[in-house]
Image (spheres, grey):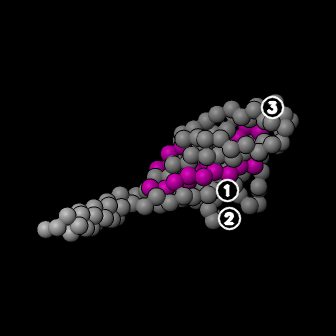
Amino acid sequence: MRYGSWLAVVFTVAIMVVAMWARTAGVETTVSLTTSPAQATITAGRYDTLENPRGTDYQVPAGETLYIDRFLGLPQVAAGSNVYVEIGYGEDGVGDSAAAPTNAVAVSAFTWVSANGAPEVLEVYAPIPSAMYPYVYVSQAMAAHAWGRVR
């Protein structure tokens, strides 16, 4: 077998292995999540399920995990004010509610120091398991948006 033919066979086998791995490993999908359209800003001391598409509570697909890795917030408070933010999941969706989702579990929490009404994007780590609904809780009024990957 000539060197060129041998290299072509190796290259073809490598592509087949990668294709089979991609099928078994699943494809990663990026998801953009927003707060309720009727309530673009979450009221202080309330929970809101993230949505995608807009107007529909997002539920993580069966057999997948959502990894939220970026969070955009726009606090509606004076500069220098602290806002406690919690990202988690529950068994159902809630819309700007004083009550937490059923069996709520917090997976990421942080205190945000407001910068005079300026939006800011933070890197976070919030794994949301299969069939669950991701939520955001805020101690002060805040508009929010999150991005993550489903795999």
- The residue furthest left is 1
Is residue 15 visible from the viewing direction of this image? yes
Which residue is painted at 63% across and 65% down in the image? 53
Quadrant for the N terminus in the image? bottom left
Mark 3 vs mark 2: in front: 3
Q: Is residue 143 magenta?
A: yes
Q: Earlier in the sequence, mark 2 or mark 1?
A: 1
Identify residue for label 3.
Answer: 81
Q: Is residue 148 magenta?
A: yes
Mark 3 belongs to which amino acid? Answer: Ser
- Prevalent SS, magenta region: strand
Is residue 102 visible from the viewing direction of this image? no
Mark 1 belongs to which amino acid? Answer: Thr
Q: Position of residue 56 (x, y in %)?
A: 63, 64
Q: Which residues are magenta?
A: 126-151
Q: Which mark is residue 34?
A: 1
Mark 2 vs mark 1: in front: 1
Tag 2 secondary structure: loop
**In this rendering, would 8 be left or right of 42?**
left
Q: CA distance from mark 3 to mark 2?
A: 30 Å
Which residue is at the front of the view, 143 or 14?
A: 14
**Rendered position, 26 above or below 66:** below
Quadrant for the C terminus in the image? bottom left
Q: Which mark is residue 99?
A: none
Q: Quadrant of residue 95?
A: bottom right
**In this rendering, would 128 be left or right of 77?**
left
Identify residue for label 2.
Answer: 55
Graded by Cα atoms within 10 Å as few (under 14), some (14 to 19) or many (20 or more), the crowding at tag 2 reads few
**Do the numbered discs 2 and 1 sit on residues whose CB atoms are within 8 Å?**
no
Q: Earlier in the sequence, mark 3 or mark 2?
A: 2
